[in-house]
Amino acid sequence: MRMVDMLRKARRRLATRQLSQLGLILLLLFPVLWLLPTALHAHEATMVDLRVRELAPGDFIWTWGIPSKGRPVSEDLSIRWPSQCEVKGQAMRCGSTGLDGMMTIDGVGRSYSAVMMHIYWYSGNSQVVTLTEAIPGARLFAGGQDARSIGEIAKSYGALGVEHILTGWDHLLFVISLVLLVGMNRRLIVTITAFTVAHSLTLAASALGLLTLRSAPVEASIALSIMLVSGESLRQRNTLSRRFPALVAMVFGLVHGLGFAGALKEIGLPEAYTVIALLTFNLGVEAGQLMLVLACWGLAAVFKPFGKGRDAQPGGSASEAFKPVGGVADHWVRNKAFVIRLQLYAIGSMGAYWTISRVVAIVTGS
């Protein structure tokens, strides 16, 4: 009887352990599994173009750009033009007053995060107006004068920067790879700062026309950086990446900055407030990046009671960032190490998939 009771207790302990292992794995993998379908389509467009062209003084035609939602844009967005403008289909007549007054777009922020309105005036001037959920309307002046305030420009482009980084899964996965490579310690601050400085430099240089590169090789290089850093995080040898993670982050940050610049070029910069728009867009990117790092820190803090945390040391892998303390914590910590490695394999595989698909697109010209 005693032996039977011991076997039953051992079986219950084993079942409890297996359930706790399964629970931890599902809990840590849930964000990856939830984001996986979206991550397969990095930088899915959530912005749409609105083209307005003045054919003669006061006479305009307008059209939506190619939708990204598989249905007409007019089903999601509704334009309210200045009151003096008479709209018939895609044609609009505004009379002697011209396209002058307040226009708004209802529905921005739901299906589409932003509308880029490009206006081509009869005089030859052109204008780009960015409309977001925070600023769904704009004051237009006939002829193309940009009457938006600095505050409106800053708010609009800052929000677009946050939106871009939080929906750019390739950039996010790269930052997560850096966190797993370095660990939650002081070196992470230096590493993330180096990444920030580097991509800010190339973002500014490219947006201001000082540096021009084709977007396809840049996007392929960004995908390759994810695969390489996640691979380095899995290695146990004292590699260059482990000794000098800030240097690696800076080198790859230069490439990621070109990716940010490509998105900013699609949005367009207001001529009168180029510096303000560029600065606030970059600050928005940094804000989104900081949100991700804080989320990683919060996740690490949640599971810290299950093991003695230690910083990732040179020569050690990210999966060894926590060491067992015996008892119940022992198998929790070992499972944590397993899950971290599993996440790195998933991130690396995603980077490899993007690298191959983007290189194929370059070669085939598709």
Image (spheres, helix red, strand yellow):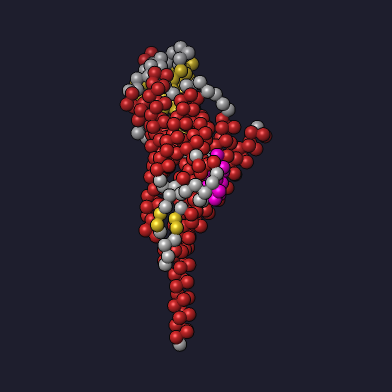
Outermost residue toward the top? 123
7 or 36: which is nearer to us? 7
| 46 and 5: which is toward the camera | 5
- Left or right: where does residue 93 sit relative to residue 345? left
Residue 309, x across and y down, in percent = 40, 54
Q: Position of residue 242 (x, y in %)?
A: 51, 44
The residue under the point 40% across, 52% down is 300
Among all residues in the image, which is located at the extreme right? 364
Please provide percent x and percent y for residue 272.
Answer: 39, 18
Q: Residue at x 42, y 36 (%)?
A: 193
Q: Does 227 lie within the magenta span?
A: yes
160 versus 321 height, above or below: above
Residue at 37% x, 52% y: name it.
301
Magenta region includes residue 33: no
Residue 195 shows up from this direction: yes
Image height of 120 relative to 327, above or below: above
How many marks the image carries: the answer is 0
Relative to 59, say whether 40 is above or below.
below
216 up-or-down from 102: above or below: below
Q: Quadrant of residue 84?
A: top left
Residue 25 percent across, percent down from the top left:
47, 59
In the image, taking residue 255 as reference, residue 159 lies left or right, namely left
Residue 43 visible here:
no
**Which residue range is magenta in the image?**
225-237
Observer-nearest of 298 and 105:
298
Magenta stretch, main secondary structure class: helix
Q: Quadrant of the N terminus?
A: bottom left
Task: Name the residue located 44 percent from the left edge and 23 percent from the top edge.
Answer: 269
Quarter of the image with the C terminus is: top right
